[in-house]
Amino acid sequence: MKKKKPKPHLSRKSFLLLFMSFILLSAVFFIACQDKRDVEKYLQKIPQADWQGGTIELTFKQPVDHKHPSGPKFSQRVVINHVGYDRPVVVQLEGYSLYSKGRSELAEILDANQITIEHRYFDESTPEPLNWEHLTIWQAATDHHKIINALKDLYKGKWVSTGISKGGQATMFHRRFYPDDVDASVPYVAPLNLAREDKRIHAFLEQVGTPHARSRIHRFQKHMLAEKASVLPLFEAYVMEKDYQFTIDMERAYELTVLEYPFAFWQWGTVPVSNIPREDDPVKERFDHLVKVSGPDFFTKEGIEKLRPFYYQAMTETGMYEYRFKPFQEYLSDTSNITFDHTLVDSMRIVFDSTAMHDVHDWLKKHGNRMMYIYGEQDPWSATAFTPSEKTDAYKFVNPGGSHRTRIRSFPLTMQDSIYTVLEKWLDVDIDKEIQ
């Protein structure tokens, strides 16, 4: 008589992973609006997920125009980092392409699950063919709303949205249109511009840092433009070495690189003022410093194409900055248009309307509760930072001397403690400050 083979033992870890697979498949089925073909596509992707790390990547079918949900669709990329069903959820709203598949600082602080959503019209979340008129803050906020609500059946705890820079803007915009989707929001270094070229950025650059620092920056720019003839050969050689391509001529690309320098210097804060070369330093040393701080790749054809959705949004709804050129106009080949119009293509119909930003501003002032705004003191984007009113349960934290790279963990410890206290109150969690 043959002995029966023992049934294979299913470990607790394997069971949990299988259970998570089942739940995610159920959620995906719901998201796909019961479209069998879409579900089959998701089924093909799920076995490839990094279950050991609790990570899975999905694509969601979204209407290109949410006002006409039965019309053309596009696939939006989403990554889920699973920690536990008893933990909060951080929704990382990217303003651009999906920067990382790992968890953000906020998710680590809260020991939270994370759902990361790539922004529409970037990278793998781009509709085809492109119809630029549907790249609006409301359309993107509705993308986020649908994904969040589809996944709420998966996680029942507290939800907090966050994003960095343009992602921080997306966080504010989503809360304005769908205030009840999450329990709190933490936008990082997010400007709220009220004009296509917001003049407050000029004013900020004229007072940021010390008079000595601003003078060093101004003199550096002036000499790099005044000695353009001797620097251009170095610029051209550098461009050839990097295989950069421009849609503007070489001289114009060089001029814009120099004009961008003060914004880039303060935005990233990676170089001390004492490292700014003086006019009697070798030209090669000055050139190397220029491209280290203000890289010409920002103006290349590839760089512009990658960021073109950003430029479209900036010049239709969200605003931008322009260059301070009058002190240098005698050295410039063209002063008629020192804006970012050169980033556009003929298929774009550009009309800036400040209504959306004023609407968001006014709503946040009156109704923006449980919003925590994180800024860096010396970041030029802080020129148009949002300041909450006393009418709302909201906080603004400014990192002393901080740049656009400011994160919660870059604050002084006493300020970090204040931030953690607010998050604990809003999200009903205990943050282990010893490991932060």
Image: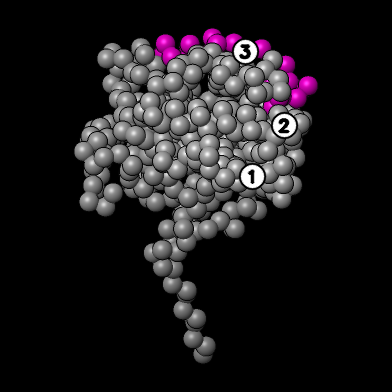
Q: Residue at x 54, y 13 (%)?
A: 195
Q: Identify residue type, mark 1.
A: Val
Question: Could you say where residue 406 lies in the image, as x and y percent from the top left?
Answer: 39, 37
Eye-nearest disc, 3 or 1? 3
Q: Mark 3 = which residue?
A: 352
Question: Could you say where residue 28 lies in the image, as x and y percent from the top left?
Answer: 56, 42
Q: Earlier in the sequence, mark 2 or mark 3?
A: 2
Give me the disc on residue 198.
none
Crowdedness near tag 3: few (<14), some (14–19) or many (≥20) residues, C-alpha within 10 Å:
some
Eye-nearest disc, 1 or 2? 2
Q: Mark 2 = which residue?
A: 251
Q: Mark 1 = which residue?
A: 39
Task: Please tell me whether residue 273 belongs to the stretch shown in magenta.
Answer: no
Q: Quadrant of residue 156?
A: top left
Q: CA distance from mark 2 to mark 3?
A: 29 Å
**Image check: 65 left or right of 288?**
right
Q: Quadrant of residue 229?
A: top right
The colour scheme used to paint the residues is: one colour
**Camera sees residue 242:** yes
Q: Earlier in the sequence, mark 1 or mark 2?
A: 1
- Relative to residue 354, is residue 307 depicted above or below? below
Q: Which residues are magenta?
A: 341-363
Q: CA distance from mark 3 to mark 1?
A: 40 Å
Q: Identify residue type, mark 3.
A: Phe
